[in-house]
Amino acid sequence: MIWYLIKNNLKLMFRNKAILATMVLGPVFVIAMLSSAFDDLMKSYEKAGKFKAGYQVEGGSFWENNMETIKKAGEESGIIFLEYPDGNPEELVKSGILSGFVKLGNEKYTIYENEDKETEGIILEYFFSRCLKESAGQAVQLKAPGAASGNFGISLQKLDYMPAVNASDYYGIIEMVYFGFLGVICIANVFISEKKNGIIQRFQITSLSCFKLYLAKWIPAVAIMASGILAASVISSVLFGIHWGNLVISAILVLLVIMAGISFGLMINAIFKNMAVTVIILFTSTFFMGFFGGSFETYMYSRLPETLKNISPVYHVNRALVEHSCMGHSGYTSSCILYFTAIIIICTVIAVLADWAGKRGKGRR
């Protein structure tokens, strides 16, 4: 019975040619617009070159024991760190002697930037966000030797700096993520048919479980959306010369996004039983995840706090895919997989429970 439903739902989804065309051509159109609009900005990042940045370190802080590693990593990234134990950071930066300055303390670090050297300031911010992520990743390992006393260090290998990314590569990758998360839209015809023909009420008298009914929509939606994003990726790669890095890892991450997006959309629809509400909530939530995650403004240039970025699952997958493209690896791959796997499981459980509760409620009437 479930395979009959999957086949029937596939037919219904294929009838909506407009949505299918949008899912294939939409990303290509948006990539063309954004890559053109941000091309000059991304090129300015490429032309930053080497620059000098001053620093002050609070005695006894975590940073003090790791400055040699940070300075070596900075030199490889084009940042020459110079120590100014007594200088005034604001005056040094305003005078043009330094392109930026960072004060490293026990609880926080503060970056001073030159208004005329915005690109260098952004690079400095990005560099220290990498340092902070590396140190935080070790700090949470409470059972590791030395973690309790704070004597953990930064690995030079893990601080290899991300090289410049051109606008076509950046937006050619992340827009597939953005559109991939909206995959539940392709199930619109199925929802309309179920409501119009009372299909759900008919299946309430069968032995089909709520989970099987859920899978009957989820499986064909994932298959169609994955095919659409694959087609869009091939078209955009041919038109714009996009480099995806490791194709296997990139495909797995994008597929996880599609699966999570459809699970999220099905959960919303199971709760509200209304396609219009589902679309509004889905688009709104995806917009904000993309806003914080770099789907519009590049996450390297974004002034948003790192804490807010890390809340967005889209940030993790965007950063993982872009870093795989230009570096060949990424420290965000594991967090991306965990994030989206959790979304798939949690949303599936809630969707099935919501359908079960609705079915049980109608059965009592």
Image: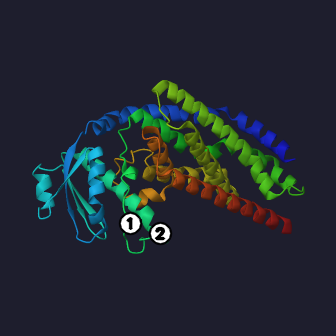
Relative to 224, is 358 above or below?
below
Of residues 30 and 275, which is closer to you in this image? 30
Q: Which residue lies at the image location 25% right of the left edge and 62% below the top edge?
A: 110
Outermost right residue: 206
Q: CA distance from mark 2 to mark 1?
A: 9 Å
The count of marks equals: 2
Left or right of residue 106, residue 348 in this image: right
Mark 1 Cα within 10 Å, few/some/many (few <14, many 20+)?
Answer: some
Residue, disc 2: 144
The picture quadrant where one finds residue 50 is: top left
Of residues 26 and 149, which is closer to you in this image? 149
**x%, y% of residue 204?**
86, 57
The picture quadrant where one finds residue 68 is: bottom left
Q: Quadrant of the C terminus?
A: bottom right
The amino acid type, in three-letter code, at marker 1 is Phe
Relative to 45, is 149 above or below?
below
Outermost front residue: 145
**From this viewpoint, is residue 189 visible?**
no
Q: Which residue lies at the image location 55% right of the left edge and 41% below the top edge?
A: 250
Please report whichever mark, 2 or 1, sits nearer to the chain's N-terminal start. 2
Mark 2 Cα within 10 Å, few/some/many (few <14, many 20+)?
Answer: few
Q: Which residue lies at the image location 81% right of the left edge and 66% below the top edge?
A: 360
Left or right of residue 236, residue 154 in this image: left
- Looking at the rendered structure, the secondary structure element under dot 2 is loop
- Looking at the rendered structure, the secondary structure element under dot 1 is loop
In the rendered structure, find residue 87 and report the number of the disc placed on it.
none
Residue, disc 1: 152
